[in-house]
Image (cartoon, grey):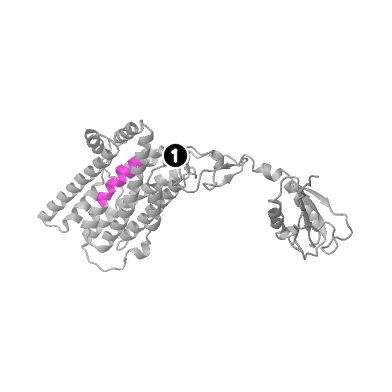
Amino acid sequence: MMRTEISPLKIIDIKDLSLDRGAHLLINRALADLPVGAKLGIRGSAPELAIHLRGWCRAQGHKVIWNDAPSSNAANDSTKSSSDENDSATSPLIGWIVRGSALAGRWQNAETAGLADYQVVGAILDEPSARWGLAARGATVETSAPEFYFGLNQKAQVWAENVPRLYAQAAAAQWNPATAINWDEAFEIPDEVETAIVQIMTYLIENETAAMLVPARFLAQIHPHFREAMQLLAIQVADEARHIEVFTRRATLRRNELGLSTASGQASLKTLIDEPDFTLAAFLLSVLGEGTFLNLLWFLETHAPDPVTRAVARLAAQDEARHVAFGMGHLQYQISKDETARPRLAQAIHRRHDVLAQTSGLNEAVFDALVLLAAGEWRVEAIAEGFKQVQQLQTEMDAGRQARLLKLGFSEKEARELSALHTRNFM
């Protein structure tokens, strides 16, 4: 005769712990091991446990079978099973929970939002679901989650192969303006040179304000699935906020008033603010603008007459180099995915040049201030040398832009012509 194995009944004793003090965690843990339709005995002595258990089971989609035995402690309860988790329990048996299917049904067809580790093949999808919304990459997302709208919801729109590495570098390279620069370091420079520095700082502040607002505007449009790109842009915004602070502190270190802001300079920056396409904005701002600014910041580090100006220029340049690297990485990634990307970049340069054709370009006061810094004094020969140094700076800026355009696949002729169309305001 064949014998049928009968699984022992499972019973837990929650003692005097009530459902509003965490008993549901113990019950859920015990139910997790049981199939739909299986029974879980509940022992307990908390006041009104039966009332609370009825409501909780109804909310969770489980049934309850009440124990009608007049007394049901561990010593005399006939329902005590070999799987009772606490053989010494003396709490009365309140009833039996019959596991429902609602909990399993709730997560039926739930999706896994990619994988947390970007290095795993397939971890980052080309176009993640709008329902994944704010969920962490790699989380299991309930099917009834609401849809979110993110304008930048495709990998090709925001990604670059160097994004994770650049984010790690950026997070490790943050510096504190209050301690990274010795603001009290003693130095003496002529009043006219101080005026020149204040003018340059004024110019840098408004350019860095544009460099902060452009990525900030796109940051909230990135699907959080592309977490590393989102984080890198957030740090880029923080970098620019810090640059605005140190340039302002240097400008007001010995003066109460800042320098001049021209209409043409603001018009040039407005074209960056108005650019609605993330890739084109990254090209115009990070690759061409901030790339050109790298030369300017290195020039200031070389020719500034005081240690504070040299320090702010050096620290800002370190951050800007990272911004340029992300812009290049993103454009190279997109060009590899979209054969129309490169012509669109060229069109963006022409379009911006046409808009700015009637403007005067670089603030004259800024140009003169750079000459004076490079000259270091007012002798005719020194001014001539300063002028020559600023011309050399512009030549190096042009060479840098051409080199980056070549890396993006433009021909030498295209790179030369496109670089020449870049705004005379540098950024």
Looking at this view, is 279 or 171 the one in front? Answer: 171
The magenta segment is 282-296
**Above-or-below relation of 237 to 409:** below
Say which element carries label 1.
Answer: helix
x 77%, y 53%: residue: 9
Q: Position of residue 254 (x, y in %)?
A: 29, 63
Image quadrant for the N terminus? top right
Looking at this view, is 67 or 246 the one in front? Answer: 67
Looking at this view, is 413 or 201 the one in front? Answer: 413
Quarter of the image for residue 199 reads bottom left
Dot 1: few (<14), some (14–19), or many (≥20) neighbours within 10 Å?
many
Quarter of the image for residue 382 reads bottom left
Q: Position of residue 334 (x, y in %)?
A: 38, 37
Q: Relative to 99, is 353 on the left or the right?
A: left
277 magenta-colored:
no
- Asked if residue 188 shows in the view, the reply is yes
- Asked if residue 54 shows in the view, the reply is no
- Residue under label 1: 155
Q: How many marks?
A: 1
User: What is the three-letter code of the residue carrying label 1?
Assistant: Lys
| SS assignment for the magenta stretch, majority | helix
Q: Position of residue 153 (x, y in %)?
A: 48, 39
284 magenta-colored:
yes
x 33%, y 33%: residue: 342
Image quadrant for the C terminus? top left
| Residue found at the far front of this picture | 1
